[in-house]
Amino acid sequence: MKVAFVFFNHPPTPFNASIAALAGAVRDAGHEAAALSIPLTTEVTSAAARVDEAGADVVAVTAMSRDWPAAQAVLEALAPGPLRVVGGYHASLAPLAVAGCDAVDAIGIGDGERPLRALLDAMAAGAPIQTRPGLWVRGEDGFSGRPPPADPEPTIADLPRWDYEVFGDVRAMLDHGLNTFGPLVDRYLPTRASRGCPYRCAYCSAPVWGEVAGFGASGGANVRPVDDLCDELASLRDRHGPEGFELWDEHFPVDVAWLRELAAAYPARVGLPFKVEMHPSAATRERLALLAEAGCALFHCGVEAGDPTLRKQTLNRRTSDETLARVFRDARELGLETSASVMTGLPGETHAQAMATVELLAALRPDSFMWSTYAALPFSPLGDAARPGWPGKAKVRLNDAPSLPSKTPPAMTDAEREDVHAALTALQRELVDEAAARRGGARPRPVAIPEARSVAEPALDVERLAARLGLRLDGARWQGDELLLDVAGEGVDGHTIAIGPADGSPAYAQTEHLRFSYRGPDGPVALLRAIERLAERLGDADLSSLRGQS
Ligand code: B12
Ligand code: SF4
């Protein structure tokens, strides 16, 4: 059977880790594989034409949530013929949404090596393709019943190795630069030592992915034995001549005995530098020292937000400023290059909180940092709080599906956001230039500035809202799940009323669906009466009916 693997990307890259894993399994079972890298700036018709030209028996699409609008549009535009299967994060976490697309014949749930191989073997044998663990197949009545459980490989060392050659000339890919860590484009090759992550950050899909994919049985992670990892990396070193390895684990293994074994074996068996990512709370001096001894060149960790309360309460990242400072100091002392990731545009983030991120980075002084605009992910606690639904299908271009307004936007004006962006861009440029100067002739990585997406919710029609609420208003805005009303009039001027969902949090007044409170110290009697009248007037209304006022 011939499989055309399709992946979407932005910025363009020739490589995809999910497909490297799946192509290895497919070719190991005697089937053919091709990989099509499709930038998200492509037009739907030309993307579909590229897939049609591959003339495959099976079109296998891997899609993160961000890619699902593109994947759906391409699948619907394909010529009839091949079986169409979709897998990866979005299909696994939101299979019912994917099942709603008529152009999908089968859905991969969790790890795909065994389910995809079973599907291809059945097709090759002319046998019916049936739903099984890890694969939900469309029947005559559509996708019936519940999606099946995943079919995780209990020991990932038993899986066929990643296939890098399915993407073409590996040395040319290395010259292009596949690395994601560090300030410079280098010739490091991505690989993996484990699956799963022991942490539960509120913005991340990894925890729920671990549950769906069945990593729970292995204590939250599935780690390759050191011997097996060293064998593979030594053979990749000899075959492709990379400069080093970038470990794309969700979280690098933390078991100290495993790290000790790595430190003892890796230098002699492999000897090339490598880069890892770990949660800063896991980065004890002992673990960092073992990494350094093994030959680790760069330590990356998430800093995410400079404001400790936002970091802890909103993101569920419980590392203190002091620990972060200790981790970066230790790493430097041990000779490891450092790298951090941060996000801006976080739920409810103020200008002051975002500037605290700039200040913390300036104090920690990593050698480089990765910076992204926060994006709500499905089935992560923050993602679920933010989304009324998920974007539909792309129309003309793969990236043109209209984005939905967030229910948890940052509390910043566009001008304030630009100020933060300018400060982070300047800091990032400075770090990249310093690194390039340190290593004369090296290629700096393009400074990755997240798109200047507007963080503001659509403006509210304040007059219409005031008429509906029977209040005089100076202004109104959404902040996350709350509607904030700046009230005007005798005795209440300058006060803000907050209307949120009736979720049991303390409030001055409450209706079936709404809670009413006010901002600031003791409310004057006129304000309290205004709130009571407001609650009475809104009766059984809910928040979505108020959103309709924008
Ligand atoms: C390494 C990594 C990256 C790398 C490259 C990833 C790549 N695809 O090559 C880099 C750093 C470039 C990257 C970037 C981004 N990433 Co990333 N990344 C990861 C990470 C840490 C590991 C992914 C990996 O290498 N897996 C190894 C392979 C073997 O496993 P796998 O991907 O799970 O694939 C298996 C199954 O999913 C399944 N499968 C996959 N596809 C298919 C298809 C079929 C047909 C079938 C049957 C099965 C199947 O079978 C595979 C083998 O078992 C994950 C975290 C995690 N939980 O794993 C995040 C993760 C995938 N990334 C995520 C995100 C959001 C991004 C970005 C959009 C971030 C940003 N704002 O820029 C970008 C987008 C990049 C792009 N596509 O252009 C999210 C996705 C969430 C979601 N619900 O969609 C994750 C889950 C992390 C998170 N924050 O929650 N990422
Ligand atoms: S440590 Fe990283 S992979 Fe793990 S839950 Fe947090 S963000 Fe996700």
Image (spheres, helix red, strand yellow):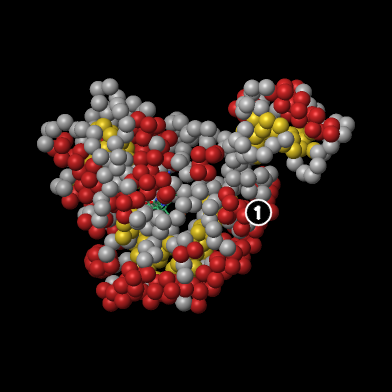
Q: Tell me: residue 186, above or below residue 455.
A: below
Residue beneath the point at 59% across and 45% down: 347
Left or right of 239, for residue 75:
right
Q: Amino acid at mark 1?
A: Gln
Residue beneath the point at 81% across and 33% down: 527
Frontmost residue, 443 versus 531: 531
- The percent coordinates of residue 451 (x first, y second) are 55, 47
Residue topped by disc 1: 353
Give the quarter of the image for residue 110.
Answer: top left
* Residue 43 can be seen, yes or no: no
Left or right of 82, for residue 409:
right
Q: Quadrant of the N terminus?
A: top left
- The percent coordinates of residue 222 (x first, y second) are 31, 57
- The percent coordinates of residue 530 (x first, y second) are 79, 29
Q: Tell me: residue 248, above or below residue 493.
A: below
> What residue occupies the far right of the structure in this picture?
490
